[in-house]
Image (cartoon, rainbow, N blue to C red):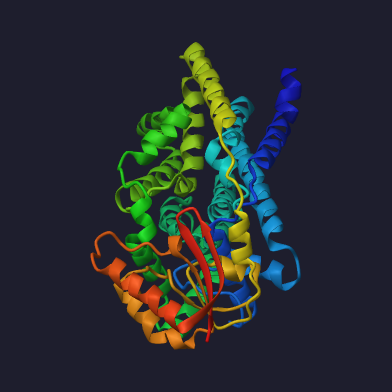
Amino acid sequence: MKGFLYKYGIYIVLLIFAILTTAFSSNLVWWDSAVYISMGKYIWSLGDLGLWEPARPVFWPLLLGFFWKIGLEVIPLASYIGSLLSIFSIYLIYLIIKDYKDTQTALIFSFIFSLSIPLLNYSSKILVDIPAMFFSLLSIYFIFKEKHYFWVGIFIGLASLTKFVYLLFIPLIFILLPFRKKPLVEYALGLFIILFPYFFIMFLIYKNPFQSLILGKELIATVTGNEFCTNSFTFYIKTLLKELPVLMLSLIPFYMIYKKREWRIVLLTLLAFVPLIYHTFFLNCKDIRYAFIFLPYLLILSAIGFAFLYKKMKILLIILIIVQILNSSILIYDFEKEPGFSTNHKEFYTYDIKGGILSTNPYISLYNDIKVNNLMYYPIFNSKKIAEIEKELDRANDIFIDTCDIPCPSQENDCEEKKTALLKKISDNYNIIFEKIEGNCELKIYKKQ
């Protein structure tokens, strides 16, 4: 039985995850997912369709837009790809732990990762977090094998163009690559091939190669949605330890670094704790999906700590693993899947409109092959944005408004008054062709008189 599990256990783990993630999948398309697909339409139509948010990385929209361009159903396909990349990520964690420690530890911790609620919940959500995590794990796998350093650069570059925060990994890997000239040159070449064209194009468009990074940082700091995020410094530690108590073992490798100074453990420690510190103390919005940049490495460190202590504390560690699996099972059982869009929202998002659009959300261009000329929510709906909208209002043929999409920042006392005046101006100068009430939200479509 032991031999069977050692040989086929990982495939059983992956099968269990595939079944669970199917049960967790939902028809609800998230806001960010709608943005990425719509940006893909914009890229592949050369700006004739979709929408553009310059603060977003481009690789995921580029890939999703390609699927749209060749006529595939993007939403289900992208959802399957996300789940598949999660499966590959679990397998990479298994391989990294197995090669560095042993098969038993690798099976235990890959299974624990496969049962984590964030992974199960976000795998099919068409977000950037899972693809970026996969690319980073693939690069670390090659580093641990001490080969294919060119591909290490390629995949870290792709991770960075999928989610900008992975740029943090570039100097960390440079510092700790085996100190030989060839690996460093190969790594730098891979990075150059991926990153240089992007930054060169940004320079041509914005006259600043780092404009998207600057806009992204400003957006995270100011976007109204962040007011509904927690900003507690203890969020990640409390949330992750509550779900994954085995992560306490991730501290053991600090002692191992002191004793052994093994470069792989040092690299894993930096990859885990530098992003954790950054997200904890330097980003005002905390969300568990942002943890995918450091969670896999905390888990690998925990596996290393587990293997180090196993002979000394076998019974206690077995109890910890049993508690962990029971805890994960209870969380999975209690998890409530998100409902899909309401009938009113479906009618609103799929309403047949041709163009010249002003919209409070990205869903209009997700479900219709149209161009959104002005995004009322981007980069932030405030008094300044309201003035901009009023100035360009005459250019809009059709206006989509969901009043719940455009909350005013709490620090702007006059924003609500200006918002009310803007909505009245739209109502006075445009004919309403669609109107529904969904909870506290008013869904309206206006057409130019």
In the figure, 369 relative to 142: above or below? below
Residue 77 or residue 150, whichever sits in front: 77
Q: Which quadrant of the rendered structure holds the N terminus?
A: top right
Query: Where residue 37 appears, x then y in whole percent?
Result: 60, 66
Write the residue at 59% across / 59% down. Answer: 344
Write the residue at 61% across / 45% down. Answer: 89
Any part of residue 63 in sight: no
59 relative position to 291: left or right = right
Residue 309 or residue 371, whichever sits in front: 371
Residue 351 or residue 434, whichever sits in front: 434
In the figure, 343 relative to 304: above or below? below
Query: Where residue 67 appears, x then y in whole percent?
Result: 71, 67
- In the rendered image, the residue lying farthest to the top is 315
Residue 106 or residue 340, whichever sits in front: 340
76 relative position to 426: left or right = right
Query: Where residue 154 appears, x then y in whole percent?
Result: 57, 62
